[in-house]
């Protein structure tokens, strides 16, 4: 049965893909079974109207993302509700036309639940919607979504590893790898830094904080011989280790990191290579 203001564009035993022109047109009938493709932005406000009916999945428009990520903030609102969600590149979207969005738009961003269903940026929305309909997300606890990836490996085998929190460091990192993570570097990070004891680390300064509390761990773990630095939270996304590495600019470092060539104002990519270096040959690695 087609609901008013909803167009069924795909129907299967598991549920349906329905196209709507506005997030406000999501209905109770979509709960737990349908993927809703809606041609409005994926901010928190429309996500409330989608999320109150908890569909199987949802795809909205990114509306150029905008200040403070307002156009896509609903991705994580829905993720917290257990809903797989994605956004479409606004350049491929006719706003207010859900059917056209389903037929012609291209995915720009995804939340972790949608990613576990195989949805990825660059995928046609119609293929993404089918994936959300046909695949169940992998069960993921809070500690499972680490976004860990090796982004560079030096000649000695040491690696630069991105992961979203220093708490996600692994035994294999101890004394060997440089971790680019994205939590603040306050005193609560000290326990994890000592536990992992990486060859080097770059975290966030958390925006500084009162009395420089966002970088306090740098000096504390200096006594343990750990080389570390922070990036300016105004330029790299907190909670995203890849952004620390890709977008970060060094805001502070301890003496051990400085001795390896890390400098305030340096791109994090360069600082990570400097930390990685055990000798001049590795520091020059591409």
Image (cartoon, rainbow, N blue to C red):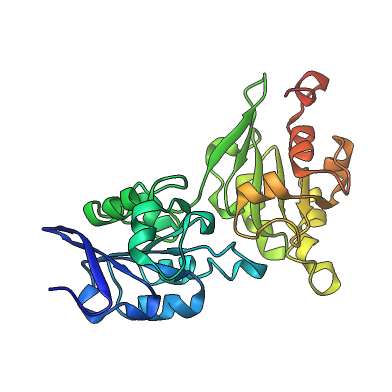
Where in the figure is residue 29, as x and y percent of width and height? 20, 77
In this rendering, is residue 200 above or below 181? Answer: above
Residue 227 falls in image quadrant: top right
| Point 79% across, 39% down: residue | 271
Residue 59: give x, y in percent of width and height: 39, 62
Q: Quadrant of the N terminus?
A: bottom left
Residue 121 versus residue 26 in the image, above or below:
above
Residue 171 can be seen, yes or no: yes
Q: Nearer the viewer, residue 253 or 83?
A: 83
Residue at x 47%, y 64% (from the top left corner): 61
Q: How many marks?
A: 0
Of 246 and 272, the residue lying toward us: 246
User: Which residue is pictured at 79% across the width and 50% down the height?
Assistant: 249
Q: Which residue: 55% across, 35% down?
A: 172
Instruction: Work out which quarter of the rendered image holds the C terminus and state it.
Output: top right
Question: Where residue 285 sits: x, y (%)?
Answer: 74, 22
């Amino acid at each position: 049965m087609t609901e008013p203001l909803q167009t069924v564009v795909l129907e299967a035993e598991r549920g349906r893909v329905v196209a709507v022109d506005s997030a406000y047109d999501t209905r109770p009938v979509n709960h737990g079974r349908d993927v809703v493709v809606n041609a409005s932005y994926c901010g928190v406000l429309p996500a409330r109207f989608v999320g109150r009916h908890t569909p199987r999945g949802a795809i909205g428009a990114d509306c150029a993302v905008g200040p403070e990520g307002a156009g896509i903030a609903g991705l994580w609102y829905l993720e917290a509700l257990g809903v797989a969600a994605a956004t479409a590149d606004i350049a491929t979207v006719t706003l207010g036309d859900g059917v056209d969005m389903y037929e012609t738009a291209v995915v720009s961003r995804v939340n972790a639940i949608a990613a576990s269903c195989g949805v990825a940026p660059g995928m046609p929305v119609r293929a993404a919607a089918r994936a959300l309909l046909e695949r169940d997300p992998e069960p993921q606890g809070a500690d499972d979504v680490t976004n860990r990836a090796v982004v560079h490996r030096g000649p000695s085998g040491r690696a630069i590893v991105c992961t979203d929190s220093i708490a996600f460091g692994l035994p294999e990192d101890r004394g060997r790898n440089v971790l680019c993570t994205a939590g603040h570097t306050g005193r609560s990070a000290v326990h994890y830094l000592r536990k992992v004891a990486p060859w080097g680390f770059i975290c966030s300064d958390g925006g500084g904080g009162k009395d420089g509390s966002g970088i306090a761990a740098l000096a504390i773990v200096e006594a343990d011989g750990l080389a570390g630095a922070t990036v300016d939270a105004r330029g790299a996304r907190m909670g995203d280790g890849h952004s620390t590495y890709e977008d970060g600019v060094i805001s502070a470092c301890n003496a051990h990191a400085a001795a390896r060539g890390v400098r305030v104002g340096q791109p994090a990519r360069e600082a990570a290579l400097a930390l990685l270096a055990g000798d001049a040959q590795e520091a020059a690695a591409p």
